[in-house]
Image (spheres, rainbow, N blue to C red):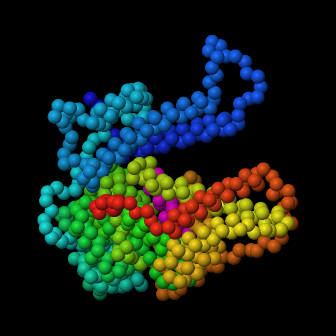
Amino acid sequence: MARRSTTPPRVHSARQGAVSLGLLLLAGVLLAFAYWEVVRGPNPRHQPAVLPVNVEISRAGLAVFVAAVVIGVAAVVGIAALDSAASMRVLSRQSAVPGRVPARVRGRRLTGSRRVRARMVLLSPPLARALGVDRVPETPLLAIPSGERPPDVRIRCTVLVPAHDEEAVLGHTLASLAAQDRRPDRVVVIADNCTDATATVARAAGAEVVETVGNTEKKAGALNQVLAGLVQDADTHEAVLVMDADSTINPEFLDRALGLLEEDPDLMAVGGLFFGEPGGGLIGQFQRNEYGRYQRVVARKLNRVFVLTGTASVIRAYALRTVSESRGTLIPGPHGKVYDTLAMTEDNELTLSLKTLGARLTSPPECRVTTEVMTTWRDLWRQRLRWHRGALENIGVYGFTRATAIYWGQQLGLAYGVLALWSYFLLLTITLLAADSIRWSPFWVTMGMVFVVERVVTVWAVGWRARALAAPILPELLYSAFLQVIFVTSIIEIVLGRKAGWNYVPRPAVNAVGVLLAVPTITSLGILLPTSVLYTDWYAALSAWVALNTFVFVGLSILQVLPPMRRWIPRRRTAS
């Protein structure tokens, strides 16, 4: 019978996921080598007979055979990784069980034990032990309360608003809570090391005020101090709205969010869709366009949550308690803490923790939150650097698992976007500097018009200013390049081990002026580079690479413009 593993399942899942991904990459390299060998063709020289059997084993055939074996091993390890991931899903009724699984069920061994025996046979015991697939992970207890749900249950909602020197904007936040169609049961402002009148503004608006004591861990530490007592004794009918002090929510927010939690006992959290506040000039409009496209993507994916935004999200109290109790074993972080204070982006990390534990989340279009936009390029740089670096560090801590696979894919997509865009810039620059004249291609102009249509359609709901900014393409192209530089910088800082900083932006009653981007016009065609450059092999290869990327992004743009292909999905499974 298979032995139970004493290693935390999160470690098993991350290791096995990384091994499985690495093996698949190795198989891809082998198949690419085989393809290269076939394309190169046979050696035209005379081939002697081979003894004792006149059969030559080609390098391409051997590479394909080894790749097939590697893919088989990757599949076995990948299934083991999914088993380990399933053992952490304590907030999903489909994965966890009410109690520990016995060694035998009705005289038969566990399915997991049979799987382990199959792995031992397929891989051999030494290899199975080396890959960590020779044991059955412990099956944790179900964290969702059992028993029948009382009819017409009403969820009580406590609002937590962490605030650090937010007297200038806190009043608007509390006013939006007072204007809710369904008022919260309790509003608590967490005054974190404030030196202004934040606490006075909160009390004047009728909110409770809790001042942090010795907190040096920013927003996450402030929330942990209050949540430690709030969720510990909370029952199954309590929820917490965590909301930023510089954000406001629409009047229907709480009514819709709490209604969804009351309708579906297996739904753990409802996140808001964030919109950028008015103002900020050109840089503010860039951000509003960006947020508008994100809202459209979420809606096209049936309200599935990518990040449970820290600007405003409603979470079941017992789900937060489960997170704190699971840290250090099932998920990373100090045991007993709801938020991991080492994470730069605490909302992204909490999303990963809830998804790892099997929680279902949703972001309905009725739950709208308006948040601040950065008004200077410097502030935007610092904010996005924290976002990118926090996201990379979070998935690095969690590893490659079932819950993080989509986030790893997103980072790879961003990296591919960097290569594609800057390759285009390089090709365009070389062409303009080396060509004697320019001839417009109707085919590629048509491809460019696809991008124009996609840019305008995806921000149509944001307003006429958004459409006017998106139509020329070039401004948003430069904005994307700016964000990509931040992404690359975040990777460099992680590799070099540089210490990260926190992006606190004070909100005085003055308007910052953005820096305008200027692009020099190249008029010296064919002067700085010889025309012969356009006939080199490397220029042809660069052109082919850019053309391939263009086709890829044209296809993605068409998919964004077309109506979403909504397949039938049961109502209770429309959130993730």
Q: Position of residue 59 (x, y in %)?
A: 63, 29
Q: Can residue 534 be seen in this view?
A: yes
Q: Does the magenta stretch include residue 450?
A: no
Q: Does the magenta stretch include residue 389?
A: yes
Residue 249 falls in image quadrant? bottom left
Quadrant of the image containing the C terminus: bottom left
Instruction: Kindly identify the residue that appears in the image at 48 percent across and 43 percent down.
Output: 21
Q: In the rendered picture of this protein, how many numbered marks are placed on residues?
A: 0
Q: Where is residue 272 in the image (x, y as percent from the top left)?
A: 37, 71
- Above or below, 82 against 173 in this view is above
Q: Is residue 224 visible?
A: no
Q: Position of residue 30 (x, y in %)?
A: 58, 36
Residue range highlighted in magenta: 381-396
Q: Position of residue 371 (x, y in %)?
A: 43, 77
Instruction: Kindly identify the residue that appears in the image at 45 percent across and 70 percent down.
Output: 296
Q: In this view, does 16 lie to the left or right of 434?
A: left
Instruction: Kindly identify the residue that appears in the image at 22 percent across and 77 percent down.
Output: 185
Which of 365/408 is in front? 365
Residue 547 falls in image quadrant? bottom right
Residue 446 falls in image quadrant? bottom right
Q: Is residue 373 left or right of residue 476?
A: left
Which of 328/90 is in front? 90
Which of 569/143 is in front? 569
Magenta residues: mostly which secondary structure? helix
Quadrant of the image containing the N terminus: top left
